[in-house]
């Protein structure tokens, strides 16, 4: 699996290793759902070790971001490096995901802010 799950304080961190694409989006979605089902309230998706994301990876991120919002999960996307950042910019994903520079900063934010994030800027995407 190209994912690594860790926990720091009350925050779960899903680290994407190498890439998020057609070969591992099913695993990614399954792991997010498992964390939500077991009661996780705060989840970080870290791209520290990711070098690539394809269209199926973007679709999985949008789907799971919406899923986490529906379940009042606070989430952050962190450690986004070039070229993944470039793909996020082209797709204008910075308007839909809450992004934080590092996982450490995201943990600090999430542990200080007990209320779920709500803003018109970060509404779930609709494909209908």
Image (cartoon, grey):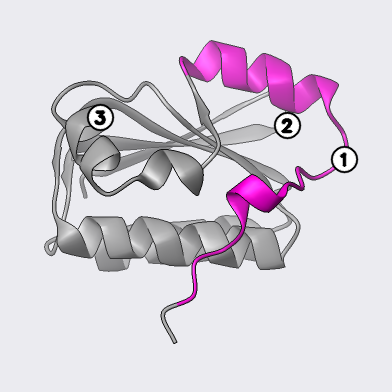
- Is 61 or 86 nearer to us in this picture? 86
The secondary structure type at the circle numbered 3 is: helix
Rendered residue at 31%/65% (across/down): 59
Q: Residue furthest bottom?
A: 128
The secondary structure type at the circle numbered 2 is: loop
- Is 95 or 43 nearer to us in this picture? 95
Rendered residue at 83%/20% (across/down): 112
Question: Which numbered mark, 1 or 2, is in the foreground of this view?
Answer: 1
Relative to 59, does residue 61 appear above or below in the rendering? above
Mark toward the start of the polypeptide (3 vs 1) = 3
Residue 52 horizontal side relative to residue 111, left or right: left
Rendered residue at 37%/21% (across/down): 79
User: Which residue corresponds to mark 1?
Assistant: 115
Distance of mark 3 from mark 1, alpha carbons?
28 Å
Is residue 128 among what the camera can see?
A: yes
Mark toward the start of the polypeptide (1 vs 2) = 2
Residue 52 on the magenta segment: no
Q: Which span of residues is magenta-colored? A: 101-126
User: Which residue corresponds to mark 2?
Assistant: 10
Residue 115 on the magenta segment: yes
Relative to 5, does residue 79 appear above or below in the rendering? above
């Amino acid at each position: 699996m190209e994912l690594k799950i860790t926990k720091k304080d009350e925050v779960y961190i899903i680290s994407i290793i190498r890439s998020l694409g057609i070969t591992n989006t099913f695993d990614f979605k399954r792991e997010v759902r498992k964390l939500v089902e077991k009661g996780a309230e705060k989840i970080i998706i870290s791209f520290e070790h990711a070098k690539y994301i394809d269209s199926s990876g973007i679709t999985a991120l949008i789907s799971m971001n919406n899923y986490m919002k529906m379940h009042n999960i606070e989430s952050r996307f962190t450690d986004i490096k070039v070229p993944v950042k470039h793909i996020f910019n082209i797709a204008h994903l910075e308007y839909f995901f809450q992004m934080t520079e590092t996982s450490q900063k995201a943990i600090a934010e999430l542990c200080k802010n007990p209320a779920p994030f709500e803003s018109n800027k970060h509404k779930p995407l609709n494909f209908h």
